[in-house]
């Protein structure tokens, strides 16, 4: 019985060592990929939108609705690249802003940023950003359940 427990411990230790090596290798591959993707130049249109959005976010004379109007005007195909580039170039762009620009949930931002070779700052969300995300989830859940109920009454 002692031998079996020792074997299990050794097996678990071996698995954990392998897992550590795999994680280190994955990290190296991510770093390599980030360098490849960062090397891609932005289109002139993306650069123009990054400048517009960064200017709007940094302009203290604009009210929140005016900032949001600029963000909402970003063409759909450019939203992800503009969000990643704004996050990379503007210290005022938080995960919340990046999510708004990209049209995604805040918790999806780190993956989006990494896809564009930008290493996310893993700071927690502000209270306001968290409240906004919870409200969005509730809204989507309510809309889905309403649609689902309406759709199921048709059959």
Image (cartoon, rainbow, N blue to C red):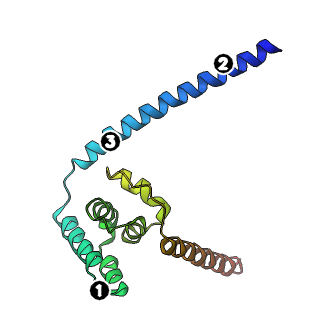
- Mark found first going from the N terminus, 1 or 2: 2
Q: Is residue 55 left or right of residue 7?
A: left
Residue that carries the numbered disc 1 in the rendered image: 62
Q: Is mark 1 on a helix, strand or loop?
A: loop
Q: Nearer the viewer, residue 3 or 44?
A: 3
Give residue 63's position: percent from left, percent from top.
33, 87
- Toward which corner of the image does residue 26 lie, by quadrant? top left
- Toward which corner of the image does residue 53 lie, by quadrant? bottom left
Residue drawn 31% across the image and 49% down it: 117
Q: Which label number is shown at residue 33?
A: 3
Q: Could you give the CA–CA distance between mark 2 and mark 3, rounded to whole angstroms?
A: 34 Å
- Mark found first going from the N terminus, 3 or 1: 3
Where 74 sits versus 1, above or below? below
Q: Is residue 23 left or right of residue 56?
A: right
Q: Residues within 10 Å of mark 1 (few under 14, many from 20)?
A: few
Say which of marks 3 and 1 sits in front: 1
Residue that carries the numbered disc 2 in the rendered image: 10
Where, quadrant-wise, is the C terminus in this rendering? bottom right
Residue drawn 20% across the image and 70% down it: 51
Q: Could you give the CA–CA distance between mark 3 and mark 1, rounded to whole angstroms?
A: 38 Å
Q: Residues within 10 Å of mark 3 (few under 14, many from 20)?
A: some
Number of callouts: 3
Q: In this view, does 11 lie to the left or right of 109?
A: right
Q: Do the residues labelled 1 and 2 touch (CB within 8 Å)?
A: no
Q: Nearer the viewer, residue 84 or 79?
A: 84
Give residue 31's position: percent from left, percent from top.
34, 40
Q: Is mark 2 on a helix, strand or loop?
A: helix
- Toward which corner of the image does residue 94 lie, by quadrant? bottom left
């Amino acid at each position: 019985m002692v031998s079996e427990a020792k074997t299990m411990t050794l097996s678990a230790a071996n698995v954990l060592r392998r897992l550590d090596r795999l994680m280190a290798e994955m990290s190296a591959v991510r770093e390599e990929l980030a360098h490849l993707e960062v090397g891609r130049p932005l289109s002139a249109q993306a650069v123009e939108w990054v400048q517009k959005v960064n200017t709007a976010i940094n302009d203290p004379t604009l009210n929140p609705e005016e900032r949001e109007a600029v963000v909402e005007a970003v063409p759909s195909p450019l939203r992800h690249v503009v969000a990643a580039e704004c996050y990379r170039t503007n210290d005022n762009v938080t995960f919340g802003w990046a999510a708004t620009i990209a049209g995604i949930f805040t918790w999806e931002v780190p993956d989006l940023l990494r896809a564009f070779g930008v290493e996310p700052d893993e700071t927690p969300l502000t209270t306001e950003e968290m409240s906004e995300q919870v409200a969005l989830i509730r809204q989507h859940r309510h809309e889905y359940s309403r649609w689902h109920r309406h759709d199921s009454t048709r059959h």
